[in-house]
Image (tube, rainbow, N blue to C red):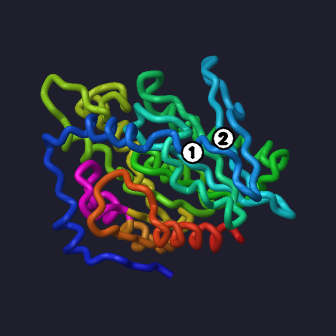
Amino acid sequence: MTKRVLDPQQASATGKTAAGMGWLLCLITSLFLAGCSTYGPERPGEKIYRDVEFAAPGGRRLCMDLYVPKTAKPAPVVLWMFGGGWRFGSKGYHVNVRDLTSVGIAVASIQYRLSQDAVYPAQLEDCCAAAEWLRVNGARYGIDATRMGASGESSGGHLATMLAAKAGKSRIQAVCALYSPTDLNELGALYAKPGKESLIDKFLGGTLEQKYALAADASPLNYISSSLPPFLIIHGERDRVVPLEHSERLFFALADAGVDAQFIVVPGKGHWFRLDDAQFSEVSRFFQVNLGR
């Protein structure tokens, strides 16, 4: 059943963003504040495997961190993609679903190539490679990758959504997208400035005028169909980096396509926030239901 947690008029009123907003500064500040708190000791009832290599495109070594609950049978897994405008960050930053191990779900936080190293679709290819690696090798680490979800925040949420669109619900059974862009042509136009290269320009490898078709190809809104898995979408009411309308439009498009979708607008929150206990409970419940826990 589709759950609607939003008044559409409220979304339209609160999602406006000034084109002159310093997105780059905002992201750098957010990453700094997030810190590397994920890199702590193992918690009771779990095992951590750090820096597990899953691919090496062009000789570039890519690794993931595995957080695996100690369960009687292999655990389902959620693939986590970090945010940072596709240009900043790492697999150790702000792993918002880190605590899923407490309910018997493993988390695979992956590194993907950043835009200074490769342009789109390299990032999505890395996510696909990580998912495939888990399907082949997950059992060695106590993971049942036939029950796989995807999640990410901001640009990572964009990649999680695109991964589900490419793989289909037979491979990715659930997606939790946190304040993520869904229309890159629209967002690119919002941040375009004459003579200045935006993060979206860097991600696409050229200006929006040069890469308009690629931006469309990289926009989740262009992949909506009944073949997508269930979605949980979370977005801050006062997001001035990725407008709330991006998640609103995704939610309604999924609902129109008959996809089970839930949409949570977090009052008073902007871009880049940690899930509180109530929000994490929603995420935990969503993955438990859809990954068979």
- Which numbered tag is attached to residue 149? none
Question: How far apart, in angstroms, are the residues tagged by discs 1 and 2?
Answer: 10 Å
Residue behind mark 2: 65
Tell me the kind of residue under disc 1.
Thr
Q: Position of residue 236 (x, y in %)?
A: 32, 61
* Label 1 element class: loop
**Residue at 33 percent of width and 35 percent of height:** 28
Residue under numbered circle 1:
38
Residue at 24%, 68% in the rendered image: 11
Using the image as rendered, state which of residue 262 and residue 30 is in the foreground. Answer: 30
- Residue at (13%, 40%) from the top-left corner? 20
Q: How many marks?
A: 2
Tell me whether the residue at label 1 lies in contact with that at label 2, contact meaning CB atoms closer than 8 angstroms: yes
Left-right relation of 287 to 84: right
Q: Image quadrant for the C terminus?
A: bottom right
Asked if residue 275 lies left or right of residue 193, the reply is right
Q: Amino acid at mark 2?
A: Asp
